[in-house]
Amino acid sequence: MSKFNYLMVLLLSFSVSALGQDYYSDIWLPLSKIYEQHTESTELFVLGQSDEDPIWGIRIGTGDIHQLVVSGHHGNEIGSIAQSIRLARSLAEDPLENRTIFVIPSLIPETFGSKRHLNSVDPNRNYPGPCGSNDTVYSSEAFSLRATALLRDFIDPDFNHEYEKRLGIPEINIVAALSLHNKGNTVHYPYSFQENALTPDATLFKELLNEAFEEGPYEVGLFPTYYYTMQGSFIDWAYWAYGIWAVLIEMGTEKDMSEGELDSDAKYSIPAMRYFLKNAPEHRTTPRQAPACDLNKMSPLGG
Ligand SMILES: [Zn+2]
């Protein structure tokens, strides 16, 4: 860890401790423990400041292939937030070859452990998409939340030079991403913005995810097949705008999973997520024209 980063981590850890005890003890402490046990291969970082709190992450490995794991778009879905930390621990203890994996467990710290929305905005409808975002309907813009704008800055090559400098990585190039949520035991690939909107990569996505989740209760398919359409989701945007192999997982059967539920889910979900990260394509796909937005193929307000 560079001196600059170490100092920042130290300073922010003090400011964090004055805030919600949960965010500090449930996110910062386990991440720093992983870092302390793997100082050679991991580094703590701050994505930036959300409304009130710093958004913590951990970089695992130094390989050429960059991948992202983000949970806590919905702060009340704490089961998947907990599993992202288990995944980070697993990746630090048993690294995937040639990978640098950035894990951000709680993207919206202000909502951690309590709620879905921040400032009446659903963070996982706060990205641009072929049909706009749900929040357009509520007259707020894509990236109106600081956290989603920061995640864009981290991913977009036009914006991420500051992160490259700070993390000492010449070129951050996220190729695959997992976006973790609760609940439903389902796994989804783009698109979600309307019914039956398949990408040219749908077959590859489906085959890879079916292999990854072969064991256990998880089912693989398009999000609207299981739930409803959603406009402005992270995975649609990451694929549509950049060609990132982005996948959404609705973990478990409860938003707030007990330790026992976390344990039994982890038996399947952790190896499956590792399998995906290990076997996902090593380059971004070419972003292609999405199907035209058809309002008749959208659920009312997208749920
Ligand atoms: Zn969610």
Image (spheres, rainbow, N blue to C red):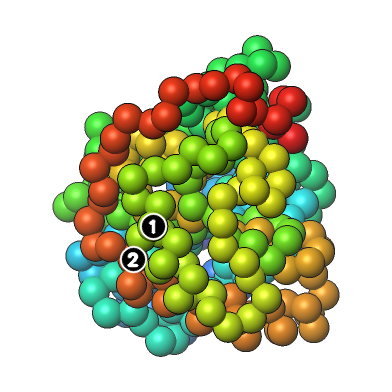
Residue 214 vs 128, above or below: the answer is: below
| Front in this rendered view, residue 41 or 221 | 221
Q: Residue furthest top?
A: 139
Q: Position of residue 95 (x, y in %)?
A: 36, 82
For residue 26, the mark is: none
Q: Which residue is mark 1?
A: 203
Residue 123 seen from this side: no
Residue 87 vs 228, above or below: the answer is: below
> Looking at numbered disc 2 in the image, what kind of residue is underneath it?
Ala
Residue 179 vs 25, above or below: the answer is: above
Q: Dot 1 surroundings within 10 Å: few (below 14), some, or many (20 or more)?
A: few
Residue at the spot x=57%, y=25% of the render? 133
Q: Quadrant of the N terminus?
A: bottom left
Q: What is the quadrant of residue 120 in the picture?
A: top right
Residue at the spot x=20%, y=50% of the render? 171
Q: Position of residue 278 (x, y in %)?
A: 35, 74
For residue 280, the mark is: 2
| Front in this rendered view, residue 102 or 48 | 102
Q: Quadrant of the C terminus?
A: top right
What secondary structure is found at the residue carrying circle 1? helix
> Looking at numbered disc 1 in the image, what kind of residue is underneath it?
Thr
